[in-house]
Amino acid sequence: MDNPLEIITTRDGSRTLYSRQYKQSFHSVHGALTEAHHVFLEGSGTEELLKSQQEVRVLEIGFGAGLNWLITAAAARQNRTRLTYTALDKQIPSAESLSQLGYGELVGAPGLATTIGEWRKSFSGDVPYGTYNLPLEHDCTLQLCIGEATEASFPDRSYDSIYFDAFDPGANPELWVPEFFGKLHRALRDGGCLATYSVAGHVRRSLTSSGFSVARRPGPPGKREVLAAWKPQAAGFRSDR
């Protein structure tokens, strides 16, 4: 059977995957690395949090090929900050595809990329649904949850930021609704931020109805605007951040 994923080179020179099934690329064709940094690492406020040298907890919806994870882990290592990263996806690309993307060398974290590749190589076909804790060096932990995101449960007020990087509402409509955003709102700490690439009106309304305060911000090349959604501080709550 033909590989359902095709490797393409984006305009900033970094690579991404194109899904023939969903007819979408994992990251922007205008620049995969640029988008990952601008929309998620910077846009969620995680980049600044990592400079505090306090533990940072990130939840990602849509792990894909791991680019968002790798740039975040590289930033954590640079700042000597502990990172706890939980990511959900229905499936992970093959070890061969991960290797061909070259993300480890791209972000200066070849060891972390190798760990993911070796773990993926241990499965001859699809990764069985379940939760996997990958052994990593330094002060980084990666928990991969493979399965249906709508069936996942999250502890309340546990994450400093959320990367919402699922395929668009046309491909994954069940994830872009108030019911699912409400679960994420409860999982986010007070004052935390959810970042995503979509600024569609129904997405903003769904986030707002779930309790988020939503703002559009300038996007990376090829995208006029992207979205940041904050969980307001609870009355009388004082953050130590």
Image (spheres, rainbow, N blue to C red):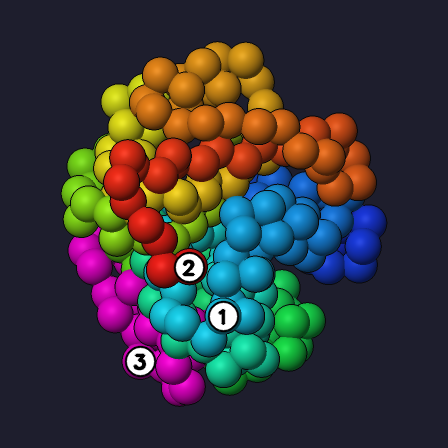
The amino acid type found where label 1 is placed reads Ser
Residue at x 26%, y 22% (from the top left corner): 179
Q: Which residue is the site of mark 3? A: 135
Q: Is residue 132 left or right of residue 55?
A: left
**Where residue 154 appears, x then y in whole percent?**
20, 46
Q: Residues within 10 Å of mark 2 (few under 14, many from 20)?
A: few
Q: Which residue is the site of mark 1? A: 52
Q: Which mark is residue 184?
A: none
In the image, residue 116 above or below residue 231: below
C-alpha separation, residue under disc 1 versus residue under disc 3: 24 Å
> Is mark 2 in CB contact (under 8 Å) with mark 1?
yes
Describe the element under mark 3 as helix, strand or loop: loop
- Most foreground residue, 190 or 180: 190
Query: Which sits earlier in the primary sequence, circle 3 or circle 2?
Result: 3
In the image, residue 158 above or below residue 148: below
Q: Which quadrant would residue 83 be assigned to in this image? A: bottom left
Residue at x 28%, y 44% (from the top left corner): 237
Q: Which residue is the site of mark 2? A: 241
Q: Is residue 8 left or right of residue 177?
A: right
Magenta span covers which residues? 115-143
